[in-house]
Image (tube, grey):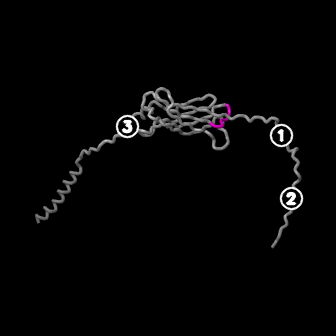
Amino acid sequence: MKHRHTVAALPLQLALLLASACATPVAVERPGHNLEAELRDFQLLQQVFREQNTVPQVFDFPGHGRVTVRDVTLDGFPGNEYVRCRFHYQNRTDKPVVQSWVSLDVLDNKGRLIASQASCCIVPVPVPIARGSFFSDELRTQTFGAHLEPGWTWRIRCTSQLEEEEEPLNPPVPERTNQDVHLPPLEIKPHPVRWN
């Protein structure tokens, strides 16, 4: 009988030994990827960019309207970085706007233009953007490494095409009135009904 208890106790001791071996932490070293340092550096640049660029930012363009930047971030990944800008355009001119171009530019630390993207703010039906109306969009402009140098920046530009009054015809076309139109009287003939 004693022999049976030893055999039964052996798997229990083995199980406890195995459980304690699995619970022991073992330091596993994995080789670091060469882009991890670049990613950490980029994340630090993103944090600095967020701290320096609070939103909303309002840009007035006299005679063209107003652009309000609602969100601006430095996005992407190492090797493909871009500035993303969510904005809305508001017509603050005296006339309706046929279309407006809003540009997001990236400038290097010497003020030179590195890259630019533009959005054409236009209503999809042939109606101008009325005074006080809004148009929202998003722009993304690559930095091409300019963000790695201190002193780089971004800017918003806006140009609008105002609605022009129609040019009068020369010589003018006389307006027609109902008295000028002579239509023959309308006759309604009875339609014969056929029964089959």
Q: Which span is picked out in magenta?
A: 94-99
Label 2 Cα neighbours within 10 Å, binned few <14 / some 14-19 / many ≥20:
few
Name the amino acid, label 3: Glu
Q: Of marks 1 and 3, which one's residue comes earlier in the chain?
A: 3
Can you say which quadrant of the picture contains the C terminus?
Answer: bottom right
Q: Is residue 116 left or right of residue 25?
A: right
Name the amino acid, label 1: Glu
Residue 38 location (% of width, % of height):
37, 37
Q: Nearest the camera: 126 or 90?
A: 126
- Looking at this view, name the residue that lies furthest to the top: 110
Q: Which residue is mark 1?
A: 175
Residue 136 location (% of width, % of height):
57, 39
Front tag of 1 and 3 = 3
User: Mark 3: which secondary structure?
Assistant: helix
Locate residue 42: give its quadrant. top left
In the rendered image, residue 98 lying in the magenta stretch gets the answer yes
Residues at marks 1 and 2, CA–CA distance in whole angstroms:
31 Å
Residue 154 location (% of width, % of height):
50, 31
Disc ID at residue 156: none
Locate residue 77: give its quadrant. top left
- Looking at this view, name the residue that lies furthest to the left: 2
Q: Is residue 182 left or right of residue 156?
A: right
Name the amino acid, label 2: Ile
User: Mark 1: which secondary structure?
Assistant: loop
Front tag of 3 and 2 = 3
Q: Which residue is mark 2?
A: 188
Pointer 1 with pointer 3, Cβ within 8 A: no
Label 1 Cα neighbours within 10 Å, binned few <14 / some 14-19 / many ≥20:
few
Residue 64 location (% of width, % of height):
62, 31
Disc ID at residue 38: 3
In the rendered image, residue 196 lying in the magenta stretch gets the answer no
The residue sitting at 86% across, 44% down in the picture is: 178
